[in-house]
Amino acid sequence: MFKKILPLNSIIFLRFFGIFLVLPLIAVYASSLENSTPLLVGIVVGGYALTQAVFQVPFGVWSDRVGRKRVIIFGLIIFLIGSIIALFATDIYTLILGRLLQGAGAIGSVVSASVSDVVREEERGKAMAIIGATIAMGFAISMILGSTVGGYFGVDTLFGITAIFTVLAIYIAIKLENSGKVEIHYMKSSKRVKVFENRILQYLFLASFLQKGIMAITFMVVPILLTQTFFWDRSELWQLYIPAMFVGLLSMPIAIKVGEKGGKPKTVFLLSSFLFIVTSVLLTFGNSEIFIITSLFVFFIAFNLIEPLIQSMASKSTKVDEKGKALGYTNSFAYFGTFVGGTTSGIFLDVGSLEIFGYLITTFSVVWFLWTLKIVNPVPKGNIYLKHSNFLQQKLERGDIDAISEWYLNVSEALLVVKFDKTKYSEEDIRKYL
């Protein structure tokens, strides 16, 4: 499994490392450029997430139609162009253009769909956890290098490093093997549920929005409180981020064991949403340094508990030929949450109403928890992988086996993949029918 996702994992690392590299100093850098205003600086910081949100779905749908590899390469080229423009920007408007183009190379959902293409469902949660850990590792390393290299050589140098890493990611993408054409065949009685009518996806959209929104709020509020109220130096913040992220990563095995393998994602989401309430309360009423530090540790645990589950559940809650679309919407809500969280926290910080803002995010977190109480764990589906034969395919095409809920043909691996309800049938039952 690891060998299959290694190239995709490398692309994710290089791309997100380049994204995160500028985060520690970009607000200060943007403020120094010609024509800058607080609003325009906010757009530099958050505009990237906005264009990510806009283009996730089109890229995901496009990848369902023309293949993942082609869309990944195109998105990386757009990201490269944005990085080069940002590198040579001498005024705030050019920098905004570069950042918006960086966001327009929205390949997150396409890479997630590619992972689900090459990894069997039984291992998908583990694969998504590896991807999540890779992103967290990229964040940790970039926080250190971004603040040191950018402080010594300039933030524009960081955009140059990002461009170099993007070229390397494009090279890896070109070498990717196509995941193969997948021909989809549905039972006649199988109804196609629209994305926004799917209750599991509805919940995942909300969870993605609030999870990433609170992430943006945390990274906006915590460093400001620590530097302005408790007089931390900006260069010291990475010493807090690294151990907090490490503790958060330790919660990922719980997501896999209980939520993925145990078939009880609701339990994990309940724990995570409760911890987000705790995070919000600590940020709202945290009038001491220890409260603020604790909020960051609690946030990373809550965040990493559900990070691998969201992507995995979204890919399994829709038809095979709509994974890109489902993951596109999921990531769009996530990036829109990042944009809203970052910009609104900036507004409330500007007017000095952080406590009121805290009440607001606590309320949303409580609503999230209450909604989680109402969801049900998805029906566990089993998968049987059979070597393709015309006789077996014709038998499946007749659609007279009620025990089979869905099947499809993976042409590249010559496999017939048969899905069934594990609560009603065993693999032996299905093989007897076939």
Image: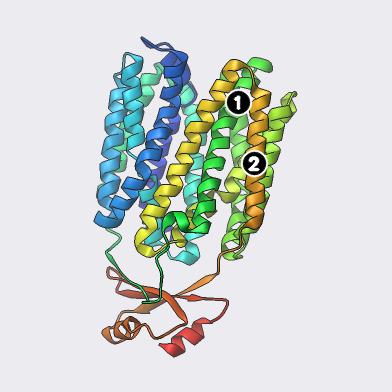
Residue drawn at point x = 40 percent, y = 44 percent: 12
Q: Earlier in the sequence, mark 2 or mark 1?
A: 1
**Pointer 2: what residue?**
365
Q: Quadrant of residue 404?
A: bottom left
- Residue 230 to residue 126: above or below: above
Residue 19 lies in quadrant: top left
Q: Residue furthest bottom?
A: 432
Which image quadrant: the N terminus?
bottom left
Q: Is residue 275 above or below residue 194?
A: above
Instruction: Judge the density around disc 2: few (<14), some (14-19), many (≥20) Cα neighbours within 10 Å.
Output: many
Please tell me whether mark 2 sits on a helix, a strand or a loop.
helix
Q: Residue at x 62, y 18 (%)?
A: 227
Q: Whole-percent x and y of residue 421?
A: 52, 75
Count of marks overlaid on the render: 2
Return the residue nearer the eye: 406 or 229.
406
- The type of residue carrying mark 1 is Val
Between 281 and 288, which is closer to the camera in this rendering? 281
Quarter of the figure with the C terminus: bottom left
Question: Which residue is disc 1 drawn over?
Answer: 221
- The residue shown at (38%, 12%) is 33
Q: Nearer the viewer, mark 2 or mark 1?
A: 2
Q: Is residue 241 left or right of residue 419?
A: right
Does any portion of residue 401 appear in the rendered image?
A: yes
Q: Quadrant of residue 367?
A: top right
> Image height check: is 382 above or below 309?
below
- Is residue 175 among the parts visible in the rendering? no
Disc number placed over residue 111 in the picture, else none: none
Of helix, strand and loop, which one carries label 1?
A: helix
Q: Position of residue 137 (x, y in %)?
A: 50, 40
Please provide percent x and percent y for residue 201.
49, 55
